[in-house]
Amino acid sequence: MSLIDSINGFKEENDAVIVAHNYQAGEIQDIADFVGDSFGLAKKVTGLDVKNVIFCGVEFMVESAVILNPDKNIIHPELKAGCPMAEMVDLDDLLEYKQKNPNTAVVSYVNTKAETKAESAICCTSSNAVKVVESVDEPKVLFVPDKNLGHYITRFVKDKEVDIWDGFCGTHDKITLDDVQQLVDKYPDAEIVVHPECRPEVVDMADYTESTAGILRRAHESDKNHMIIGTEKEMGHRLKKEVPDKEYHFPGNPTCQNMKKITLEKVLKSLENLEPIVTVDEELAHRAKKPLERMVRIGRGNE
């Protein structure tokens, strides 16, 4: 029996589904029941009538699924698959900031740990970040942790003071103007679509700035034969499967090594043993759930 046959067999036997983020390796996306971005997967898991969920993503995504689904077993095939950007928020520093700025609303990107979410007024995704910041009542906002997404927000939100945490996604931040220009020189008619976690100067060069869901939508809508995509390279796997009539080019070949820590063998082991089940302290989960629920009520913004 092949590895994939074994995965499918245990999935059926153990009442389990597999969800995978767009940045997972192509072979992981191919065995998943659902593939999507953080927001889409959070909504999908909540709506699943199943006991066991194998979540192929990084730590903060799994934590969010646990917080929103206390009735399900959320199983992470590789507990060491974390998010360096999420680690850039030191809880003591955040608490000190809040103490000094009591009238400031903390808006946290979903790419944060549960303890950060618990200290936030509301969470956001890359697709609804502008709408979320606009929605808060306070005239001043602290946005954590991604400075590039924070600067993107300030392009559109002019009626609030926005403090920006000094964090970043190493995968997106490594995409440079030179990387993009090299591809533009080679494919001058290509449409340029980048993720808002990219540097401001890269965003300036783009035709569109979109979340991964928005990038997929642009692929469907664009009349260009070539697209320059400023995000993690495994997004190309999904793009090629769903919109195969275009060529996709990734400046700098950006790779998230943490996403790649999940393998088919680890997925099979998780399905066989239904572990490791991820848990979040009950009191912490209660506090972190409120800003997540507020985020879900806001929706995707313009998507």
Image (cartoon, grey):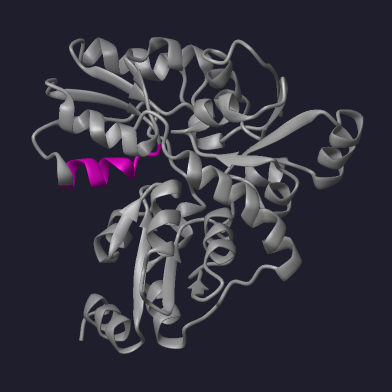
Q: Residue at x 25, y 79 (%)?
A: 8
The secondary structure making up most of the magenta span is helix
Judge whether residue 238 is colored magenta.
yes
Residue 155 point in image, percent of width and height: 53, 12
| Residue extent of the magenta highlight | 232-241
Q: Position of residue 219 (x, y in %)?
A: 20, 31
Q: Is residue 50 magenta?
A: no
* Depicted 97 relative to depicted 75: above or below: above
113 with respect to 261 (left or right): right
* Residue sitting farthest toward the front: 137
Q: Is residue 117 above or below residue 191?
A: below
Q: Is residue 186 above or below residue 69?
A: above
Q: Residue at x 55, y 32 (%)?
A: 132
Asked which quadrant contains residue 225, the reply is top left
Q: Position of residue 164 (x, y in %)?
A: 69, 24
Residue lying at 49% horizontally and 31% vertically, measured from the top left? 172
Is residue 88 visible to the viewer in this orientation of the structure? yes
